[in-house]
Each structure stands twice: as structure tokens, then as C-alpha cells.
Image: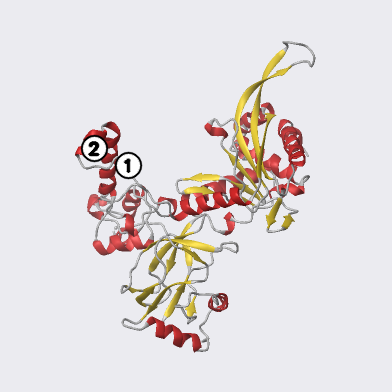
Amino acid sequence: MAHIVIMPRQGNTVESCVIVGWNKKEGDTVQADSPLCDVETDKATFEVVAGAEGTVLKILHEAGDDVPVLEPIAIIGNAGEDWQTALSTAASAPPTSQTSASSALALSAASDLPAHVSQGSVSAVQMGPASSAAAVSPRARQLAARAAVDISGVAGTGPGGRIIERDVQAGLQDRPALTAAARAALSSEGSGAANLADVGTGIGGRLREADLGIAQERAQEREAHSIAVSDPSQAAAAGTPEQIETPIKGIRKIISDRMLQSLSSTAQFTLNSHARADKLQELRQRFKASNQDLGLSGITINDLVLFAVSRVLSHYPFMNAHKIDDRIITYRSVHLGLAVDTERGLMVPVIRNADHLSLAQISTEAKRLAAACQNGTITADELNGSTFTVTNLGALGIESFTPVINIPEVAILGVCSIELKPIAKIQGVPGDIEFVPHIGLSLTINHQVVDGAPAARFLKALCDTISQIDLWLAR
């Protein structure tokens, strides 16, 4: 009977995923663990495996489609099998003892499937982060085989120049990580890393099957672009286009759509202010110079701001809220979203219960989450459920900006650069001023939920807290 591959649910709040690309085509033979396609949410990229051995009878969605979770995306069965008939038969068959809980969920949730797709024997498929590569003495040879490494170019450091495991491992350090499909393709072709691109299009820069052998093609594109920029007439003569058209798709399209939805569905209003930053800078220097055993040397100014936000939000619950349709949901705990810039786009991991964490714990968790976003190991659950978001552009010298709300949240804080500002040493004494470092803060609110005056009071309280951050740490 035909096996239906469904779009897995990756996290409780993920409603749909975009199909980045298919690793198999109709008519291909697959094993149960064969990577069928790469999909991504607005946060991360994952592989969907076939889940059954057989032939790909039908692919129901094209690359670039945004597919609701638990909806069928492909059918696998015996070669020549009529997938439509098989699905109709499967729909009337009683569930077997092998049917998993996820399968039952998929069957019950798929009542609104397209008319041409019946609800057949839907089996859950597993979805996880694209696996990284690793890959020849016997142990070295096994490693090279697993990682699809061409050992002809590996220099051996063992007795008599023998290639040992550590030699293969050393070669892997200079090679980008591969998805399972890319690794399988390299193994079947017997090719090594000579023609691999520096960075792939998969999660964390992993090379997907589609990326293999495109390094030369990319070099040609870069050369053509260089010609076009330096001498447009030469580019035209060489038949090189003066512009490159890139379709908006995948995670970039999801981010684009979400930003537009945020701006079009909320009344966004931004307030800008500054807080004295001399205490921030002083504490940062003391932490940096502290004994390593204390574990405080890595605490940054951004960590201090996150700590301050988590404490102030507890006193202003209307800022720690979601607007969902005509309801406002306020939260007792602060789940702090942290905007992280990655090569694939903006990600917002969540520091859970930040108001109950110490400064050191917030710093550690922020660094762990940011690293997971950068290297592609972040999970969907770690990217959902924030109640208030902080985004920091201060390191780029931005003095103020208008952050866009991470809906359904009702507010977002932008952290800006630290600038010297003149203040009076003694009030009422003209000309007696000093220059004190101040950090810029840009607070965007949803004016449908939060009025300007309450938001201004929150921002003032936050500025006061940051200015006296040393006192708050003593509480």
C-alpha cells in the first residue's frame, strides 16, 4: 500500500514549512532513511526522510511551496502503482497496529487535504537538523567512507606515511559540512572535496546535493559580476548581464511576508530615548578583568541590557503580552526573544523565564542560543514562545532605529550604540557640563494594545534601571 509522506510538525507553534528543494524526483527508488527533501520554517532548515522503502510515485508540492504541517507532500509505493487508487484503498482500510500516534494525528488533522489526495496510510516521518559530515588504517577508511572523503589527497602522518584517522579528521576541518543527501551523492560518485563550494545553502552553511560541483559556476558568476561592475560595456560585449535577478523564496520569503504582516496588521509606534551607560561600561570592564574561575569574563553590555529588560518587564506586564485577534494575553514569566543575525536570515531564539535567571545565567543562555542559530543546531521549540523581543544594532554604530514587532508580541526593544552626550554637572550652572556615555534605546509598541504614555513610563523605568544597573544586580 502506498505510503504518504507528510509535512512534519516541527514545534508546537509551527503551522507550515517551505520546501527548499527536492533531493529525489518521481520515479526514484528510496530507502526509509533516504533524505527526500529539505524544508524550512521561518527559523531553521531540516531534512524530511522518505519513511518507507519504494519508488517515489508522486510529488504533491513543488520547491518553494509553503505547505501546512501534516499535509501530504509525496507518495511512495511500488513502481507502476496507481497512487490515486492506492490512496483511495488506504483511506477505507482500518488502521494497523503499526500505525503511530503521529500517523493518527495526521489522519485526523488532514480532513481539509486537497481533493486529489485521499487520507491513506499516512506514516509519520522524522525530521531533524541536517546532519554534518565527518569521514581512512581501517578506522580512517571507515571514517572516510562515512564522510565521503577522497583520501587520495590526504597526507598520512602514521608509520611509513600511513593515513590514520586523525589525518582524515584534519582534512574534514577545512571542508564544509554536508547534508546526508550530499554525502550520499559524493560517496556514490567517489568524488572528494576539490570541487565543493565554500558555503552551502543548507542550515548552518551545509552543502546540499544541489550545491555539489557549483564552486566553479559560482566563481564564474563572481568574475562576470566583477566585469559588469568595472566595465559595463565590456560586460555587454562579453554577453554578461549587468544585473543578477534572485527570486525571493525560502526563509527570506517567510521573513519578508512576516515583516509585511507585522506592519500591515498592527499600529506600530516608536519611542526613542537614552540611558546613562557609564555603569554598564564600568561593570563590563570589571567582568572582563575578573578571575576566570568566576565565569563572568564573557558577560557583555547586551547581557546587562537583557537582564535589565527582564526585571523591568515584571513591573509592566502589559508590555509582556501577545495580541491574538481581539484578545490580549499577558504573561507572568518573561520569555525574552533575542534577535540573532545569521547568514540565512534573522532568527529569534528565546531565553525562557529570563526574569528568574541571574545575569550569568542569562549571559550563558544567550550565547548558547546565538551559537546554535549560527551553526544550525537550533530547534524549533527554542525559536518559539517569546513574549518580548530585544534586537541590538549598537555594534554597527546605529544611534536609533525602528524595530519591527515580532507578532503576536506587542512591543520590541531596539538597542543602539553608546554615544557621549553633554549633561550639566550642577543643575542651573550654565556652561558647567560633562560628557557622559549614553546608550540609545528604541521601543516600538503596538498602539492597538499599548498607549504612548504607559510605554513611555516603561521606557523611562528601563533607562533608570540601566543607569543604576549595579544596584539592580545587588537585589
Q: Disc 2 residue type?
A: Ala
For residue 114, side relative to residue 101 (left or right): left
Looking at the rendered structure, the secondary structure element under dot 2 is helix
Q: Disc 1 residue type?
A: Gln
Looking at the rendered structure, the secondary structure element under dot 1 is loop
What color scheme is it? Answer: secondary structure
Where, quadrant-wise, is the N terminus in this rendering? bottom left
Residue 201 lies, in percent from the top left, at 39, 52
Occupied quadrant, residue 233: top left
- Asked whether the beta carbons under mark 1 and mark 2 sit within 8 Å of each other, the answer is no
Residue 419 lies, in percent from the top left, at 61, 25
Local crowd size for mark 2, using a 10 Å CA cut-off: few (<14), some (14–19), many (≥20) = some
Residue at left offset 67%, top offset 26%: 278
The dot on residue 235 is: 2
Compute the Cα span from label 1 to label 2: 10 Å
Occupied quadrant, residue 271: top right
Local crowd size for mark 1, using a 10 Å CA cut-off: few (<14), some (14–19), many (≥20) = few
To which residue does mark 1 refer? 243
Residue at left offset 50%, top offset 88%: 92
Instruction: Please indicate, yes or no, whether residue 15 appears anywhere in the rendered image.
Output: yes
Whichever of labels 1 and 2 marks the residue nearer the N terminus, that label is 2
Where, quadrant-wise, is the C terminus in this rendering? top right
For residue 475, side relative to residue 48 (left or right): right
Residue 442 lies, in percent from the top left, at 64, 36
